[in-house]
Image (cartoon, rainbow, N blue to C red):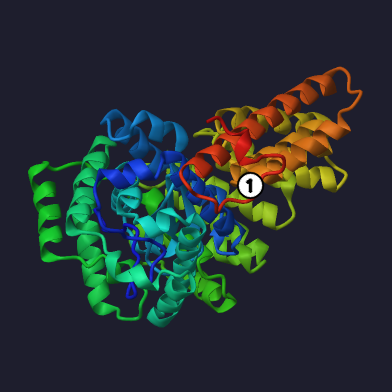
Amino acid sequence: MLALALALSAQAVTAQVRLPSLGESAVEDITVGAERRLGDQVMRQIRADPSYIDDPVLREYLDSLFQPLVAASRQRGDIEPELDRQFAWEAFLLRERTVNAFALPGGFVGVHLGLIALTTSSDELASVLAHELAHVTQRHIARGSIAAQRNSMVSMAALLLGLIVAARSSNADLANATIVGSQAASIQGQLNFSRDVEREADRMGYGTLTAAGFAPQGMAQMFEKLDSANRLNDSGAFPYLRSHPLTVERISEARSRAMFSGGGKGAPPLRHALMQQRARVLMDSDPQTLHRLVDQGTGAVDAPLRDRIATAYAAALSASLLREHASAERLAAATLALATKAEPREPQAERDLQLLQAQIRLNAGQPAAALQVLDAITVDARGRAPLLMRTQAVLDLQRSGKGSPDALRAATESLQTWVTDHPADAGAWSQLAATADAAGFKLRAVRAEAEARYASGDVNGAIDRLRAGQAAARGAAGQDFIEASVIDARLRELRAQLRRAFCEARASGDNSGPPIEGLEVRDCPR
């Protein structure tokens, strides 16, 4: 698959750290818990960055590709039990035009919108994710770490973050400065991933890709697309290719695997075409660009049906972002009508067009009309995107004084059910905090705020909110007593978790973590 591993060299201007395989001793020295802590450190900074985007529709689509890959990797036995238990297994999006994807310590995989915009099928995009997932499951980060980095997790986190920033500028000098700034200049020459590691990620990624049901041709197609695009474009828009050169050997191996695997059936194309266009709109919200997309969508009358639907989707979304609400509404309705004429019809793509209609009405300040569209969805109606949009509509109605207490309670309970099944969904926890507060469930709102912070990697912030909940719950009775009991139990759990992490870090000689109130080395078991 794509060699989008972690890259760290003076020439590698990328959001990744590619490190040499130094044997299994490195894996033993850097524990799974330490790797997750480092990933959480980096992710806290990434989530606070303006480029981090939790677009419900694109995030739902990305998860529909990534999670089956994770499940397939589990079934293949590639994920060890401890790794499975402690790693996040989370894919996230960055609002960047460059073509890039990268793995981070702890099971996080980042995807630039520019990569989605380049791909023409879900199989191609899944091939990238499968390759990055292989770097995580095989612990290439830990296998490539050296002693100097093991002694300073903060330096490693700073280096990773610096390279993410440097990737946006396509400036090798900035990457070099970042490395020096993080005190890593002395080791940069040692930090090139070996060809063996890249081949392992290709091989493991290919096995995961096919086991998850994606077309095996996706990898070869993606290699060829990148090779061709990079030869025609020398603008620095393909940062990972500078550290992951596409060799003839790798392309040939991908072609051979696809040829010997048989035909394979690609995923229906329309849904990916819509998400490709959505990525193009969201990665560049400059009004001039949006106006151009509107013009393209309204002028493509002679194009094939699939292309007309995709460009019209981009036009409708662009018009909505330009606050041309009436135009956006007309375009979205016409696009959905076109989609019903596709052969074969794709219900999932039609659902995404309904979600577009709901989004347009929310942007236009018409929450009641948005709810009408959401009520009409029959495909995956309880998915994350419709759930969050429905919640937003209910909140908007409540704030306008037209809301229904029953609808607000129903939205709160739906979110509560969702986060029970998806406890790492920070966005859903934040929505739950808002609905619970509006419904008068103050303790539940405080606890949801705490869980949102915890899901974002801010354990200390979560503990602070739980303590605030404890203080507010003194003398609580009835339902509040139950919520207070949950807060007490959760606070004990998080404190114990911090203590374990603190003691594990100190035992391994890592003193870089933040101080923890009330904890000292003497509190750790000997």
- Examine the rendered structure and indicate whether residue 166 appears above or below residue 337: below
Q: Work out which residue is located at the far right of the displayed protein and give it.
A: 475
Name the kind of residue labelled 1 in the image: Asp
Residue positioned 63% across, 34% down in the render? 523
User: In the picture, residue 102 is in which quadrant?
Assistant: bottom left
Rendering coords of residue 477 (x, y %): 88, 19
Name the residue nearer the viewer: 115 or 406.
Answer: 115
Q: Work out which residue is located at the far top of the displayed protein and give it.
A: 478
Rendering coords of residue 92 (x, y %): 48, 51
Would you say residue 168 is visible in this rendering?
A: yes
Q: Is residue 373 left or right of residue 90?
A: right
Rendering coords of residue 135 (x, y %): 31, 49
User: In the picture, residue 345 is in which quadrant?
Assistant: top left
Residue positioned 36% across, 67% down in the render? 302
| Tag 1 secondary structure | loop
- Examine the rendered structure and indicate whether residue 248 appears above or below residue 513: below
